[in-house]
Image (cartoon, grey):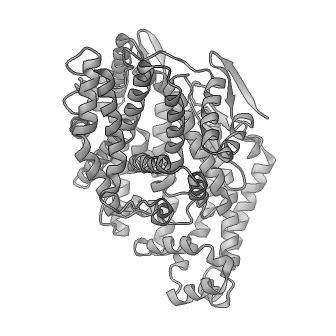
């Protein structure tokens, strides 16, 4: 059943998690959890030390299907526990339920550790013969290929089990501490106590007084909790160093590249291209923005401020829904149809609420169910774009679901493609309907800022993480050291047009990606530059493009990015590839400069 909450933005949808389970006391949840425990034990008993013989006998598919089915079941259990918790992270019962679920899933999955290890021990000729002789098994050829890449970094089974079991009291526990701390933080703004999301929102307010008040409130609260955030960062960076050392990864980001199915050289080329473009993109734009605001330089709280010419337009939920669905539908009616159930089936949670996870995300759950979108909707144009972004993830996940539990998940190199493309479709639709030069200027400036936040800022984040993790290998870091690294990358990426006011040095502390997914951030820049290139191809020749695009999304994680981009004539390994996307941002800045004359 669709749940809604009425407020100033209309009827905002709320999650209906009953498509997964009816609640934390659900008999079906308890039954499925017991079944998962039993199935995991049976799986180990049925297949351990037998996989090469099964491959030789042409029976490996049976084990793979059983593993995939169990992955879907455990994924459903874990998804429900997390989503239920994300709705109210300050609820002790929900937190305990998720913690107990994670512990149970970790324990039962210990029985499954042997599977990937033993698959990688199968002789290459034996595995190749099995794939050649079974068409259904051959569908998993790319999955096997990616799995084999991890072979040099796998450890002896008992050590893998220890790493796995200790994760509950290790990384998982520290992640939860960070999340619950962030959700409970209060920010005093002119005597009013606000949560993080509402306080960050003030940094985009028309009033400089409010922006400054929001900035100062963030600084004070982060400083008050700096010792904890510094400790969490040190522990998790050390935890990663231990894992990398045991697995013999050469570079601090190699484990992420492996998970992303992307070569280190490709990411290095992306980082280099963006950093070289800082002067002609962010440096140039922020100097222009300072001039538009009548200043010599922007204060730190001005960076995301609306321009004087910007309209303070707020969109109610129905308007935002129509804007995004119309943009999707104009590109592809099929894409819009895939998106519609999100709005009338309880698949979106949009209202800002106390204790709710901040930010936005799309959770794929499992192929046998459907994705859920988390938003904190405040009616601003950025919130409309966030809806378009997360909805892109959602339709991508729906399309890829047919690949099954093992191959539906898309590597991060392409995981942001549909989301950023959804934003671009929505932006271009709004831009085409701009009434006049003033409105076009306002929209272009907003889009440029979003692109700078996606490309420049995320690569700066990646550079920051590299500094932190590299330095941590030499010893524990003091808060002042981390602050200095943050200021260094911020100055490099933002340029002289932005003043890094006192207190800004602590802003690294609230970025969740540093905690949850080290080095994830470059995926945003990858996706944005890729989408800019894809959209340029679409503009060159729209005929047949939508069909190829939907095929790319439907492939999920069943193909390498090089194969998926080939139909569009794009190659991420080409050093000039990244310039296509960066040049598109520069062209928008050029137009802004011309419009402002």
Which residue is pictured at 63% across the width and 73% down the height?
139
**Quadrant in the picture for residue 309:** top left
86 left or right of 565 in image? right
Question: Is 131 rendered above or below residue 431?
Answer: below
Q: Residue 456: in sight, yes or no?
A: yes
Q: Is residue 587 left or right of residue 556?
A: left
| Quarter the N terminus occupies | top right
Left or right, 378 with reference to 136: left
The image quarter in which residue 408 lies:
bottom right
Q: How many marks?
A: 0
Front residue (pair 360, 546): 546
Residue 399: x and y in percent read 65, 54
Whole-percent x, y for residue 278 in the image: 25, 40
Residue at 69% over, 71% down:
65
Q: Residue at x 46, y 70 (%)?
A: 159
Whether residue 299 can be seen here: no
Q: At which x and y percent is residue 105?
A: 62, 57
In the image, is residue 475 above or below residue 389?
Answer: below
Q: Residue at x 56, y 40 (%)?
A: 390
């Amino acid at each position: 059943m669709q749940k809604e909450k009425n407020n100033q933005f209309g009827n905002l949808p709320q999650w209906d998690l009953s498509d997964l389970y009816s609640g934390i006391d659900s008999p079906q949840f308890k039954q499925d959890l017991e079944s998962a425990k039993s199935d995991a034990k049976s799986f180990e008993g049925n297949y351990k030390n037998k996989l090469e013989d099964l491959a030789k006998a042409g029976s490996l598919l049976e084990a793979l299907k059983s593993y995939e089915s169990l992955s879907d079941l455990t994924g459903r259990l874990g998804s429900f526990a997390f989503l239920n918790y994300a709705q109210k992270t300050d609820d002790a019962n929900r937190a305990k339920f998720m913690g107990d679920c994670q512990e149970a899933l970790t324990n039962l999955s210990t029985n499954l550790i042997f599977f990937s290890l033993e698959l990688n021990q199968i002789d290459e000729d034996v595995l190749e013969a099995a794939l050649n002789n079974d068409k259904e098994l051959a569908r998993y050829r790319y999955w096997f290929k990616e799995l084999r890449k991890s072979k040099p970094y796998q450890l002896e089974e008992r050590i893998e089990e220890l790493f796995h079991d200790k994760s509950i009291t290790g990384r998982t526990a520290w992640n939860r501490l960070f999340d619950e701390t962030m959700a409970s933080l209060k920010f005093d703004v002119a005597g009013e106590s606000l949560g993080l999301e509402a306080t960050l929102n003030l940094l985009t307010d028309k009033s400089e007084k409010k922006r400054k008040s929001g900035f100062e409130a963030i600084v004070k609260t982060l400083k008050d909790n700096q010792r904890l955030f510094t400790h969490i960062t040190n522990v998790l960076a050390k935890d990663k160093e231990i894992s990398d050392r045991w697995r013999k990864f050469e570079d601090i980001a190699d484990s992420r590249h492996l998970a992303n199915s992307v070569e280190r050289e490709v990411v290095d080329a992306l980082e280099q291209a963006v950093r070289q473009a800082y002067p002609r993109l962010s440096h140039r734009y922020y100097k222009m923005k300072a001039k538009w605001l009548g200043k010599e330089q922007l204060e730190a709280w001005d960076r995301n401020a609306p321009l004087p010419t910007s309209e303070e337009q707020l969109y109610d939920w129905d308007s935002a829904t129509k804007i995004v669905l119309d943009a999707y539908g104009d590109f592809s009616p099929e894409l819009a149809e895939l998106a519609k159930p999100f709005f009338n089936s309880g698949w979106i949670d949009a209202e800002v609420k106390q204790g709710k996870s901040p930010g936005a995300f799309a959770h794929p759950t499992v192929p046998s169910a459907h994705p859920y979108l988390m938003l904190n909707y405040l009616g601003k144009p950025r919130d409309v774009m966030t809806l378009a972004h997360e909805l892109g993830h959602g339709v991508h996940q729906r399309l890829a679901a047919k690949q099954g539990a093992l191959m539906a998940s898309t590597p991060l190199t392409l995981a942001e493609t549909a989301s950023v493309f959804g934003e671009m479709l929505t932006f271009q639709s709004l831009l085409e309907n701009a009434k006049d030069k003033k409105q076009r200027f306002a929209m272009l400036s907003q889009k440029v800022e979003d692109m700078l936040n996606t490309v420049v800022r995320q690569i700066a984040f990646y550079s920051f993480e590299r500094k932190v993790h590299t330095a941590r290998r030499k010893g524990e870091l003091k808060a002042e050291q981390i602050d200095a690294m943050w200021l260094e990358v911020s100055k490099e990426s933002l340029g002289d047009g932005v003043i890094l006011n006192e207190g800004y040095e602590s802003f690294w502390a609230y970025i969740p990606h540093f905690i949850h997914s080290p080095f994830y951030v470059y995926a945003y820049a990858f996706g944005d530059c890729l989408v800019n290139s894809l959209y340029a191809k679409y503009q060159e020749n729209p005929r047949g493009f939508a069909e190829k695009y939907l095929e790319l999304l439907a492939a999920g994680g069943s193909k390498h990015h090089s194969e998926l981009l080939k139909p569009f004539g794009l190659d991420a390994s080409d050093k000039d590839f990244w310039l296509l996307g960066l040049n598109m941002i520069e062209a928008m800045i050029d137009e802004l400069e011309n419009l402002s004359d």
